[in-house]
Image (cartoon, rainbow, N blue to C red):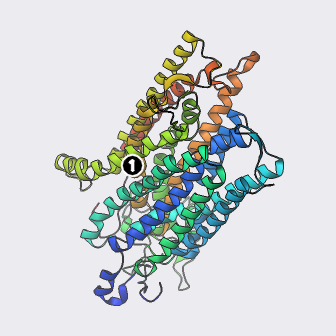
Amino acid sequence: MGEEDVYTKDGTVDYKGNPANKKKTGTWKACPFILGNECCERLAYYGMSSNLVLYFKIRLHQHSTTASNNVTNWGGTCYITPLIGAFFADAYLGRYWTIACFSIIYVLGMTLLTLSASVTGLKPTCTGKDNCHATNIQSTVCFIALYLIALGTGGIKPCVSSYGADQFDDADEAEKKRKGSFFNWFYFSINIGALIAGSVLVYIQDNVGWGLGFAIPAAAMAIAVCTFFSGTRLYRNQKPGGSPLTRLCQVVVASFRKYRVEVPADKSLLYETADAESVIKGSRKLDHTQDLSFFDKAAVETQTNHIKEPVNPWRLCTVTQVEELKAIIRLLPVWATVIVFSTVSNQMGTLFVLQGYTMDPHVGKSSFKIPAASLSIFDVLSVLFWVPVYDRIIVPVARRFTGHKSGLTQLQRMVIGLLISIFAMISAAILEVVRLKMVRRHDYYNYKYVPMSIFWQVPQYFLIGCAEVFTFIGQLEFFYEQAPDAMRSMCSALQLTTNALGSYLSSLLVTIVTGISTRHGKLGWIPDNLNYGHLHYFFWLLAVLSVLNLGAFLLVARWYTYKRAVGTLR
């Protein structure tokens, strides 16, 4: 990796001044290794997490609500830790070395989890298939492994998509056009891994054993690391630009120090370096924007700034540095309005699984049973269907009507996904209403499962998969494109935190609903035996929240101002 990497003042690769070197690296020559790494890593992650709620409930002997909350809290942590990895990537290590270092932690966590499910003394004691008990030490080892995995994934998630997009040069129109397709196929590769995990690995965990069921994901993660290192000589790398948090704080401090200073009407008088490149490594200069004008005060030159000594960035910031802060602030409302969507999506790993666990798992009249957690493969199949349809059909057709190079803007794409997610919750609620009517009509309250095929869950999974293609991929591309150049890992981590907060919101809603609905000795909406519950009320609640969230998103989208690098077209 080091011989080809020579950097210009702004931190981008200059290929040693030889265009031939550019042709040897990056673009789709490098991307297969990145996509292969992501596919194997996601296979490992989903292979371990898809069935986790049942592992907690059956093997660790946890209550349904406790198991659901433990999964959502852990899943939420997996989407908070990317803030740690992103900081190291943007500030010190760069994306390549961040992915490499945190992958090792990931493998260690997967190995420990496998041992906790297979080694006598570490694994729970079972007297039958569904009669298990875990000691405090055994549970602790399991959770240590899971949170090591959460830390490891925190260094990979915010970097790998940005690192793949880095392989396409924004200054090259042909490469820039292909970058949009990268995000579609990146999400496609995620779901290839998820498909294998949700079908083969969940079956192994339910019917063969949890030890082997966790060992295979651990091996997949090891393969992911090897695949990533295999492409080292083909990657294009950018130098880290220094601490992004420090730069943001400098703008805030400088602005408040000059809160009485008037911003000149002629914005060309605001401070910016005379060089063609930005002083921030890895970043192009950014054009001034009119909104959030209070922070322009940080770039106003005063008499105390006119000294020959180096400029103090805590008193005077460049326009580009100010625009970095503005770009982050503008992203926050968009970020906030995706949290409810993530809450809806997270039901696939918790309440959808518990709902499916009460339904007939047989495939036709055969003796073969499909595990409830395996229904998530229909979410994956939906994504695998809609990604090529979107990339090859919807984009060209939409481009004819809109004239936009991507067919739809990223915000328009996200709106469609938010709308579809509402119908997913409506579908889940209607299914539960019908299921409970059957329970009450035929007195199936104490049956292990009602004679209603689990495949009636397919529409809700398929709708969420379709919504993901529009919202999650649109969000992924939006946060990369609108992020300041030297803060792309941080912004990728920021968009990932919507998954974390979606998990935490789901956990909070379940806790609140359980607390209120179990008053006066009632069983509540989500009891251990769902046949006595009202799970559909919870799905209706999420549908209503999704409608309100869609309205908020439409308002935010109308208000949004796009960033623009100096010398580029919007």
Label 1 residue SS: loop
Mark 1 nearby-residue class (10 Å; few <14, some 14–19, many ≥20): some
Relative image position of residue 27 (x, y in whole percent): 33, 72
Residue 279 seen in render: no
Residue closer to the observer: 246 or 353? 353
User: Which residue type carries mark 1?
Assistant: Tyr
The residue that disc 1 covers is 560
Please indicate, yes or no, whether residue 139 appears anywhere in the rendered image: yes
How far across and down, in percent of the image, does residue 363 sit?
A: 46, 33
Taking the spot 33% from the left edge, 46% from the top edge, the residue there is: 385
Of 269 and 211, the residue lying toward us: 211
The residue located at (44%, 68%) in the rendering is 34
* Relative vertical location of residue 216 with respect to residue 390 in this rendering, above or below: below
Looking at the image, residue 568 lies above or below residue 418: below
Residue 177 is drawn in which quadrant?
Answer: bottom left
Count of labels shown?
1
Q: Position of residue 297 (x, y in %)?
A: 50, 62
In the image, is residue 78 above or below residue 34?
above
Relative to the observer, which residue lies in front, 360 or 267? 360
Q: Is residue 319 above or below residue 412?
A: below
From the image, which quarter does the C terminus lie in? bottom left
Tell which of 106 and 9 is nearer to you. 106
Which residue is drawn at the image coordinates 62% and 65% (left, top)?
Answer: 107
Residue furthest right in the image? 136
> At 31% across and 89% down in the image, what residue appears?
18
